[in-house]
């Protein structure tokens, strides 16, 4: 029963031309983004912002699933409707971030390991009861002098696989997110090499833990150079490097790949996803989709700035970004959409 349900959920998350919306920023991360825009860092401001997102008109046309944060999954609209119900009524599958964040990895300066396995079985059961049908766990891999180490890659891959197995046991689809960070001056080629090594390790561990690949979603970084790298590639070059890497490391049984945006400018993330679908959509075994946070939310947050009167314009901006990424899934995104 559970196996059939998670197979169907995984398919639904990447069906057609829709994608995921990550709105699962932890309180410190959300507050950091609010502070940069002069928005008060209060419980009520965070709740109001999440209400703005989930009540965006027609969001379900573009978004298949939304990833919530623990505090958010317990919240409701000002009118008293639980966010989970608002999402379900909009045709959006509720999901939940279940990791406890990336912590310093002992003995490995500059590297992190994601924690949160203790008590995870019990938490997953509670989230499933609250209506969540999928979950997310993010591992971060920093690139630098001599890093990532094998120890960091293996520790994170094993945690991702143990999380994924627990999710499937609980009837939730695991979104498996190993993120190679964009910080640094590394080249596109180095990102490709590290991303491939990380994905190979992750899929080795997923196999070791008996995770059903057909009932999971991979959420990787695109293969891009570091932000401080002198040479920045075209969208086509990113598409080629990314798909080449995925073809080498991701089994065909996985139904969908939903990229994170990782701090890329919104329009660039859409253009790169579009290039992948233009060039490879009919030639790859998995859906090439999106699971963006910043690349969907950022323009809306900048318009909202904590003011109720800005909500309609912010919602329009949020819908626009979701719609651009939906077009990118079809390979039909153009810069003209930005001026329309
Ligand atoms: P970004 O798209 O902002 O990278 O966030 C995706 C995400 O969910 C990170 O865990």
Image (spheres, grey):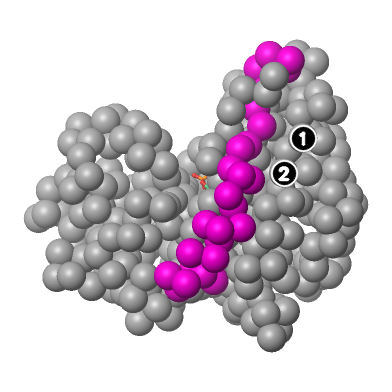
Q: Secondary structure at mark 1?
A: helix
State the extent of the magenta-drawn residues as a range: 107-133
Relative to 324, does residue 114 appear above or below in the rendering?
above
Left or right, 292 with respect to 284, comes to left
Quarter placement of the C terminus: bottom left
The residue shown at (42%, 52%) is: 69
Q: Which numbered circle lies on residue 155?
A: 1
Q: Name the quadrant containing residue 186.
A: top right
Where is residue 325 shown, x and y percent of the image?
A: 51, 62
Relative to 231, does residue 271 appear above or below in the rendering?
below
Left or right, 8 with respect to 57, comes to right
Relative to 177, does residue 20 appear above or below in the rendering?
below
Where is residue 284 shown, x and y percent of the image?
A: 81, 67
Relative to 290, does residue 160 appear above or below in the rendering?
above
Are the residues tagged 1 and 2 within 8 Å (C-beta)?
Answer: yes
Left or right, 307 with respect to 11, comes to left
Q: Label 1 vs label 2: CA separation?
A: 6 Å
Does the stretch in magenta take in 229? Answer: no
Where is residue 330 shown, x and y percent of the image?
A: 61, 71
Residue placed most toward the observer, 140 or 222: 140
Q: Which numbered circle lies on residue 159?
A: 2
The residue shown at (65%, 62%) is: 167
């Amino acid at each position: 029963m559970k196996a059939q349900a998670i197979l169907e959920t995984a398919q639904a998350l990447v069906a057609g031309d829709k994608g995921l919306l990550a709105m699962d920023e932890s309180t410190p991360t959300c507050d950091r983004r609010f502070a940069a825009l002069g928005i008060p860092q209060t419980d009520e401001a965070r709740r109001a912002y999440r209400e703005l997102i989930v009540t965006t008109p027609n969001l379900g046309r573009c978004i298949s699933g939304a990833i919530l944060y623990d505090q958010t999954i317990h919240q409701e609209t000002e009118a008293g409707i639980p966010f989970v119900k608002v999402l379900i009524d909009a045709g959006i599958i509720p999901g939940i971030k279940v990791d406890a964040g990336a912590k310093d990895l002992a003995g490995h300066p500059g590297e992190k390991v994601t924690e949160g396995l203790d008590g995870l079985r019990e938490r997953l059961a509670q989230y499933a009861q609250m209506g969540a049908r999928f979950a997310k766990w993010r591992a971060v891999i920093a690139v630098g002098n001599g890093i990532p180490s094998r120890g960091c890659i293996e520790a994170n891959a094993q945690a991702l696989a143990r999380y994924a197995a627990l999710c499937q046991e609980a009837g939730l689809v695991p979104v498996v997110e190993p993120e190679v960070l964009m910080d640094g001056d590394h080249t596109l080629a180095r990102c490709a090499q590290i991303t491939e090594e990380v994905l190979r390790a992750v899929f080795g561990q997923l196999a070791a833990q008996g995770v059903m690949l057909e009932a999971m979603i991979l959420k990787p970084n695109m293969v891009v150079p570091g932000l401080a790298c002198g040479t920045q590639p075209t969208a086509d070059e990113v598409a080629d490097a990314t798909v080449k890497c995925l073809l080498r490391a991701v089994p065909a049984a996985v139904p969908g790949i939903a990229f994170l945006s990782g701090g890329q400018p919104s329009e660039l993330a859409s253009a790169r996803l579009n290039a992948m679908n233009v060039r490879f959509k009919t030639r790859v075994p998995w859906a090439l989709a999106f699971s963006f946070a910043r690349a969907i939310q950022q323009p809306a947050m900048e318009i909202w700035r904590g003011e109720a009167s800005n909500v309609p314009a912010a919602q329009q901006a949020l819908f626009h970004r979701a719609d651009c990424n939906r077009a990118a899934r079809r390979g039909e995104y153009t810069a003209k959409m930005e001026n329309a």
